[in-house]
Image (cartoon, helix red, strand yellow):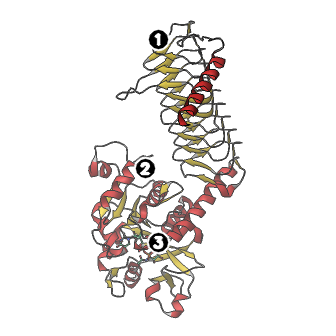
Amino acid sequence: MKVAGVILAAGIGKRMNSYLPKVLHKLSGRMMLQHVLNTLYKLKPQKVVVVVGKYFKEIKESIIQTNPPIPPLLKGGKGGLLRTQNSGLIFAQQKEAKGTGDALLRALPYLRGFKGTVVVVNGDTPLITRETLKKFLRFHEEKNDVISVLSFMSQETGSYGRIMRGKTGYITSIVEEMDATYLQKNIREVNSGVYAIDSDAFHLLKEIKLNESKGEYYLTDIIRIARNKGLKTGAYCIGSEAEFIGVNTREELEKARRLMKDRIIRRWTDRGVSFVDTTLVFISSDVKIGRDTIVYPNVHLEGNTKVGRGCTIYPNVRIQNSIIGDGAIIRDSTLIEDSVVKNRASVGPFAHIRPGSEIGTGAKIGNFVEVKKSVIGSGTKASHLTYLGDAKIGKDVNIGAGTITCNYDGYKKHITTIGDNVFIGSDSQLIAPVRIGKGAYIGAGSTITKNVPSKALALSRIEQRHLKGWALKRKSKVKSSKLKAKGAKS
Ligand code: UD1
Ligand code: CA
């Protein structure tokens, strides 16, 4: 079966009370619209049309720039709309939010020539799953329906459209809450906002009339129109209420977020990850975690982070878009951004690994150490109070407490290169650009401005002097000056 997808996302989302378009609100680190898109892509559609409204530019740009880009259809082609159209993702505009029926009509020109099933999904139902959509499409195909609706039984029927079934069980229409009679309101089977429509039936959209009570064109009316023409319509009550939660308010966003979070935690516990407290971890949808890793409370794993097997992530750690190797230990209160921490390395407590860094196998980055855009070789240790910026550091180097790479001269950033097996004494400043040759030693407290040859000892501090009896002399000096001052007063 050939499939195309349409996402309706042009509603204003007034009830969110936000400057941000509703479908760009995030849950579990991913925009609502992106959740829906990712799920749709799993059906391998020939194209996906996203109908957006007032915030056309913002939504289109956010989706295209999102990391990771929506695979694989966005790849290739040249910039702008052309690129997305060529690659299967199209943004159609509905300038005025005139209802879901009108919104789908805006997608029509982009589906011209497509023959198959069009899956329509609301952009504000981020929890739908591939499994349910697949099951739904199977029903649609098996039953030879022209139009199918995915429905579910709801405990809180609130703003959902109610499914009306005729004597034979066929769906006859969908009635919106606003237009429902008292009896209809008691119906628990509701419309999820997911439809499968045969491309041949698309012209029916044009027959939808304005609904006077809301001043909108209701897509749901297409069911009645099709039935009246004797076309086959179906409603399939599959999936759970939690999956179809429509996000219209912040409260519903929070509800969806919690459900999504539970789903993510469940996925990783099933795959052998331990959480000390599952209620207190925050894991984005795109994160991956290896088996036998232990995650302590108040840990945030964000973006495309990949944590290896057998790692320990202690409390209050935030890791963003980073790769953590097997057996690594990330200690308390550490921030890691856009970096790689290799196998068995240890980072923290209170460390900051800034973008572009690589911490080598078995390396140790300790208390109050900041690393920026630097490569730290395997087995190298920087255990305390250090800044390593724009540095290339070899293997088994020992960086003493308080070492600073002075990488910035006020205009430009410069590189510090440190060879294997170097020993940097505590409280040293390395004024970049500078190279420290393999196996060299830097005496504690040195300010290094010139390259240091391999195996040499570099010292740059004045020799220690002792002024004998200086303290006694100072004491008598102070005493006599105090006496003088007293005399002047009286
Ligand atoms: C809609 C359905 C309802 C269903 C519910 C499921 C209609 C008339 N009602 O109600 O039966 O139970 O979804 O969640 O379809 N949109 C546009 N353009 C518009 C209006 C809306 O693109 O002019 C988009 C919105 O961005 C949203 C989706 O369509 O993603 C649904 O719109 P919304 O206003 O949230 O409809 P509901 O009242 O939730
Ligand atoms: Ca809605």
- Name the N-terminal-most of marks 1 and 2: 2
- Tally the numbered discs: 3
Mark 3 residue's CB less than 8 Å from ligand 2: yes
Q: Is residue 161 above or below residue 407?
A: below
| Residue that lies at the very extreme toward the bottom in this rendered image | 182
Residue 178 horizontal/vertical position (percent): 44, 86
The label number, if any, that marks residue 248 in the structure image: 3
Q: The residue tagged with tag 3: helix, strand or loop?
A: loop
Residue 15 placement: quadrant? bottom left
Residue 399 in view of the camera: no
Q: In which quarter of the image is residue 358?
A: top right
Residue position for label 1: 451
Between the C-alphas of marks 1 and 2, the distance is 47 Å
**Number of residues whose C-alpha sits closer than 10 Å to that of mark 2, classed few (under 14), some (14–19) or many (20 or more):** some
User: Residue 109 in the image: x percent, y percent?
Assistant: 27, 64
Please name which of the two marks, 1 or 3, marks the residue nearer to the observer: 1
Residue type of the residue flagged with mark 3:
Asn
Residue kind at label 1, given as amino acid type: Asn
Within 8 Å of ligand 1, the CB of disc 2?
no
- The span from disc 3 to disc 2 (Cα, nearest Å) is 24 Å
Residue shown at 68% from the left, 51% from the top: 297
Nearest to N terminus: mark 3 or mark 2: 2
Name the residue carrying label 2.
70
Q: In which quarter of the image is the C terminus?
A: top right
Residue 213 position (above or below residue 397):
below
